[in-house]
Image: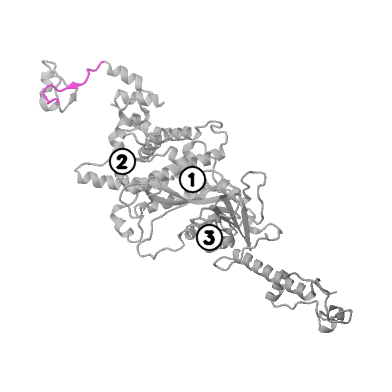
């Protein structure tokens, strides 16, 4: 019996160069199958009945129409790059290697359990960062003081940690827009400010804060626009990479840090709230708020060519440490592309991301069309790549690319009938945005015209957030059930940072003002010998202003005239020389 083939099967075999089997030779065709043969012996045909020739003509026309339809379908699923996106998903076999996780998320192994918020914070702002900033700050302080004819008092480690603690305290209380003088002087604000250090000393440290040696900066600027902050930035990122193992999914996105000042890599984006920003690309955990690695976008460095495929290069740099882990990377349409997905698959990494409509890898069927129904979905499969086009509203469609999903799973029970790819993307796309939002809630940033200070404040904010995530991972019971747990974490961290310097100030300055001593007592810092000293001072005369000096000098003295008992200073008094014989 002759084999039967559909038109699609015939077209496929013709394209493949195969012969159509089933009709071996003319000898196999019987007389009954001859279209000119008539059983009655005459060549006439019965009127009104279609002949076999007419049937073959109609079959030919139907085969032509089906061929045109198949060609149209193929052209709709063919992209400009020549890749064909099939409607049928690939056959499911054993779990692919890039979907197998090889690490467990959480604090890195080998680290001791942290006891206090300060212990967790010091894992990210380590002693080498503190020493580098102190060294550069003291260099700048001596230079400025020498130019003014004054002497600079070097910043110690306890004093610098207290300076950071007061900065974090202002952020936890959302006082970033309150002047420093008001924070230290107003009785309505926290007494920890005035108890820790003088307002003048705080401003001196803030004005002279530096992160590199200014004498060698010009040489480093020849190859790096970020030379004034590069070393501290690299030290911080090393700590972020080593302290925590991310979960099965990470996200790559950008953070915009508002800044209005002089900077070579300042970004102007009128569609953003601040218009002028410093752009930082971060890779963050998609499950918990933790910043793993980051790149400050500095534009084209001196001597470099114009960068091409910036988004792909950023993802490859940030995710190079995740290779062969079986993780998934979520990204938006600035980064997603088919070549990047194929490259990451070779590293056992999968991606889920949105695609821009102008990409040449998208076939016409996936693009927006008013003829498509709302909440309808089109799938396309090409090897290990899956493309999804979802109509969110009339004439609008969002296109996603995934190397993690390989099926047509759609939530039919929901009203919008979203696919599994879209649901996964919506759950994991907010990692960087969540981190940026939490950082902005209790930020320590203050107004400045120096971009290294802006990046330094951003480092402090990211470090405190990472420390909070690390600490709560080791201590899940910490402030559990409290909505402002992170604010309480910041306040405890601030107190731990300022307490050592507050104690040394109380012990090293015997003549502190009463208001400062009372502020220290309110902060829980007292001196054991405070009461005896107060009793011994009760018999001493009160210090008064010299009666001879001008009032604008306000010179307080303990000396009094032996005859009229008025207070006088050493400049307006004389010492009488008396020998030992006369004294007796």
Residue 304 in sight from this viewpoint: yes
Q: Name the residue under label 3.
A: 337
Residue 532 colored magenta? no
Q: In this view, does 574 lie above or below 112?
A: above
Residue neighbourhood size for the residue with mark 3, other residues' Cα within 10 Å, grouped as few (<14), some (14–19), many (≥20): many
Q: What element carries label 2?
A: helix
* Rendering coords of residue 413 (x, y %): 67, 44
Q: Is mark 1 on a helix, strand or loop?
A: helix
Q: Name the residue under label 1.
A: 433
Mark 1 or mark 3: which is in front?
3
Looking at the rendering, the stretch of residues picked out in magenta corresponds to 539-551
Whichever of labels 2 and 1 marks the residue nearer the N terminus, that label is 2
Residue 542 colored magenta? yes
Whichever of labels 3 and 2 marks the residue nearer the N terminus, that label is 2
* Rendering coords of residue 566 (x, y %): 13, 18
* Rendering coords of residue 305 (x, y %): 39, 66
Residue 109 in sight from this viewpoint: no
Give the alpha-carbon distance from disc 3 to disc 2, as whole Å: 47 Å
Image side of residue 348 versus residue 152, left or right:
right
Q: Mark 2 points at which residue?
A: 205
Q: Which residue is drawn at 44% across and 63% down?
A: 308
């Amino acid at each position: 019996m002759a084999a039967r083939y559909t038109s699609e099967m015939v077209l496929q075999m013709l394209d493949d160069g195969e012969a159509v089997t089933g009709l071996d030779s003319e000898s196999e065709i019987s007389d009954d199958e001859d279209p000119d043969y008539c059983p009655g012996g005459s060549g006439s045909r019965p009127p009104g009945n279609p002949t076999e020739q007419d049937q073959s003509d109609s079959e030919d026309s139907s085969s032509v129409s089906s061929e045109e339809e198949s060609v149209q379908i193929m052209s709709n699923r063919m992209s400009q790059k020549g890749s064909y996106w099939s409607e049928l998903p690939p056959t499911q076999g054993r779990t692919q290697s890039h979907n197998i996780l090889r690490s467990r998320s959480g604090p890195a192994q080998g680290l001791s359990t942290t006891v206090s918020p300060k212990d967790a914070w010091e894992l990210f702002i380590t002693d080498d960062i503190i020493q580098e900033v102190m060294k550069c700050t003291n260099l700048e302080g001596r230079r400025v003081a020498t130019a003014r004819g004054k002497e600079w008092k070097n910043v110690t480690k306890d004093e610098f940690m207290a300076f950071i603690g007061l900065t974090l305290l202002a952020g936890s209380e959302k006082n970033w827009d309150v002047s420093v003088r008001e924070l230290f002087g107003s009785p309505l604000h926290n007494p920890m400010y005035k108890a820790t250090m003088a307002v003048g000393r705080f401003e001196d440290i803030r004005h002279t804060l530096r992160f590199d040696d200014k004498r060698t900066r010009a040489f480093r600027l020849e190859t790096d626009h970020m030379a004034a902050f590069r070393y501290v930035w690299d030290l911080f990122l090393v700590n972020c990479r080593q302290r925590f193992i991310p979960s099965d999914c990470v996200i790559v996105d950008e953070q915009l840090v508002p800044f209005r000042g002089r900077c070579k890599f300042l970004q102007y984006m009128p569609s953003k709230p601040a218009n002028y920003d410093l752009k930082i690309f971060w890779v963050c955990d998609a499950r918990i708020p933790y910043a793993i690695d980051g790149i400050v976008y500095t534009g084209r460095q001196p001597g470099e060519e114009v960068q091409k495929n910036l988004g792909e290069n950023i993802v490859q740099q940030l995710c190079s440490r995740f290779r062969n882990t079986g993780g998934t990377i979520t990204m938006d349409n600035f980064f997603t592309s088919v070549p990047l997905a194929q490259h990451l698959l070779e590293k056992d990494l999968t991606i889920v991301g949105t695609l821009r409509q102008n990409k040449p890898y998208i076939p016409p069927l996936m693009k927006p069309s008013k003829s498509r129904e709302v909440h309808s979905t089109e799938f396309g499969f090409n090897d290990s790549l899956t493309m999804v086009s979802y109509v969110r509203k009339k004439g609008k469609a969002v296109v996603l690319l995934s190397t993690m999903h390989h099926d047509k799973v759609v939530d039919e029970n929901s009203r919008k009938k979203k696919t599994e790819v879209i649901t996964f993307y919506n759950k994991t796309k907010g990692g960087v945005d969540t981190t940026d939002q939490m950082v902005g809630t209790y930020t320590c940033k203050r107004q400045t015209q120096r971009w290294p200070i802006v990046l330094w404040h951003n480092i402090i904010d990211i470090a405190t957030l990472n420390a909070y995530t690390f600490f709560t991972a080791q201590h899940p019971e910490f402030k559990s059930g409290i909505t402002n747990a992170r604010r309480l974490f910041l306040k405890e961290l601030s107190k731990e940072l300022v307490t050592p310097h507050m104690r040394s100030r109380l012990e090293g300055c015997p003549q502190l003002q009463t208001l400062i001593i009372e502020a220290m007592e309110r902060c829980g810092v007292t001196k054991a010998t405070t009461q005896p000293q107060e009793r011994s001072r009760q018999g001493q005369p009160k210090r008064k202003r010299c009666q001879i000096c001008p009032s604008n000098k306000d010179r307080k003295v303990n000396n009094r005239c032996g005859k009229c008992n008025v207070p006088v200073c050493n400049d307006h008094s004389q010492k009488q020389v008396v020998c030992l014989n006369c004294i007796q």
